[in-house]
Image: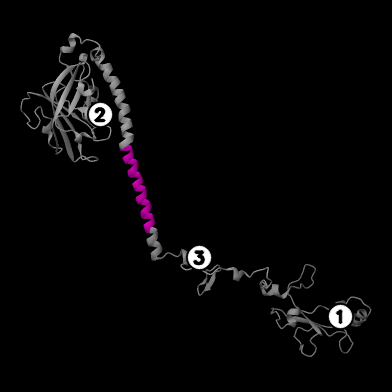
Amino acid sequence: ADAVRRPDATWAGRQSGERSLRPPVDRTAAQGDRPTTDGPTAFIPKSGAAGGGPSAPVSPAAPDRSADPGATAVIPAVSGRTPAGSAALVESTALMGAVPRPPKTDEPGIPDAAAEQPKPRRGERVVQLRPEQTNAGYRSVYSELTRPTLGSRLRAGIRITGEVLITFGMVVLLFAGYEVWGKSAIVDAHQNDLSQQLAQAWGPDGDPTVAPTASASTKPKPPAQGKPMAGLYIPKLDKSWVVVEGVTQKDIRYAPGHYPSSALPGQVGNFSVAGHRNRATFWRLDELNDGDAIVVEGKTDWYVYKVTRNHIVKPTQVEVVAPVPGKPGQKPTKSMLTLTTCNPKFDNYQRLIVHAELARTQPKSAGRPAELGG
């Protein structure tokens, strides 16, 4: 404002070495890249122009600068005002909203960013790192990668199917492991408890070191349902079990069960025993052949049976446990042993049957049978 009131002082001060009051020249306007604004542009004449008089009034119209390019300075007019009421001057680049690009350098120590981008190798895909403008607007830089296609859906379906199959396979393996090892450990633990219960139920008469009493010659009574009643040994399979009374699922869960309607060990008739086809019970029953020994332990005696037949029947063929196997209604004349279990392994639509005849009876006082290493 002071330069407008005293134009002569500008040149005088310049001659005396004082600071010039001439406003700076807008280099953007001088280079021909004039900013476009919504308001008028003010031109302030240089002090000391032709005529020497006071400066001309500020005109909102743009004058012809071709006559004297250095006579005026371009200052964009801004409509906003500061709290003090004076006009606020803003750079033209800020009014345009433009962000200057970083200048490229050719110095050897600063490589160009574009030159550092490696060329894609064969089979690789280049993804744009900037959003692209389309007719519908800007789209995400990853839209092509996230948009579902037929191939992506097929791959997702195959992946989900594979995960389900792997999970199912793990469940099957865990179940098989339980059937093979877990259930065997549980059955063995229950067998130990049943063995102690059987020894307590027999008392002194069941101890081979004590002579049997007169009551031992009387006819034994069948035990209560679910209670231990005899011992069963198969030397060829190196297996032994405590047999309980009853053949319900609860009875034979951890031990072979005696058919209540069949004969007792050593009696004339058919001593019939049922057991599950698992690793802990009758898993290898199909390995028995004719002549193999099966030993049954009673309260006072050992009963040694010899296998006579091993065959498979339907579940409805209940005549296999009749007093005379295969001949229901016929009166028995021999002591028989019948073992029944499911067939095949891991299923139950058949029955595996093993028949045996009593070969001899040995008192416990005489020691263990030779078939058991006595």
Q: As shown in the figure, which amino acid type bears the numbered disc 1?
A: Val
Residue 107 lies in quadrant: bottom right
Residue 174 belongs to magenta span: yes
Q: Name the residue under label 2.
A: 238
SS type, badge 2: loop
Q: Where is residue 259 in the image (x, y as percent from the top left)?
A: 17, 27
Q: As shown in the figure, which amino acid type bears the numbered disc 2?
A: Asp
SS type, badge 3: loop
Question: Which badge, 3 or 2, comes first in the chain's sequence?
Answer: 3
What's drawn in magenta, residue-wise? 157-179
Q: Do the residues labelled 3 and 2 touch (CB within 8 Å)?
A: no
Question: Which badge, 3 or 1, comes first in the chain's sequence?
Answer: 1
Quarter of the figure with the N terminus:
bottom right
Q: Name the residue under label 3.
A: 142
Q: As shown in the figure, which amino acid type bears the numbered disc 3?
A: Tyr
SS type, badge 1: helix
The answer for how far apart the CA atoms under marks 3 and 2 are is: 68 Å
Residue 164 belongs to magenta span: yes
Direction from residue 20 to residue 110 in the image, left or right = left
In the foreground, 210 or 257: 210
Q: Where is residue 172 in the image (x, y as percent from the top left)?
A: 32, 44
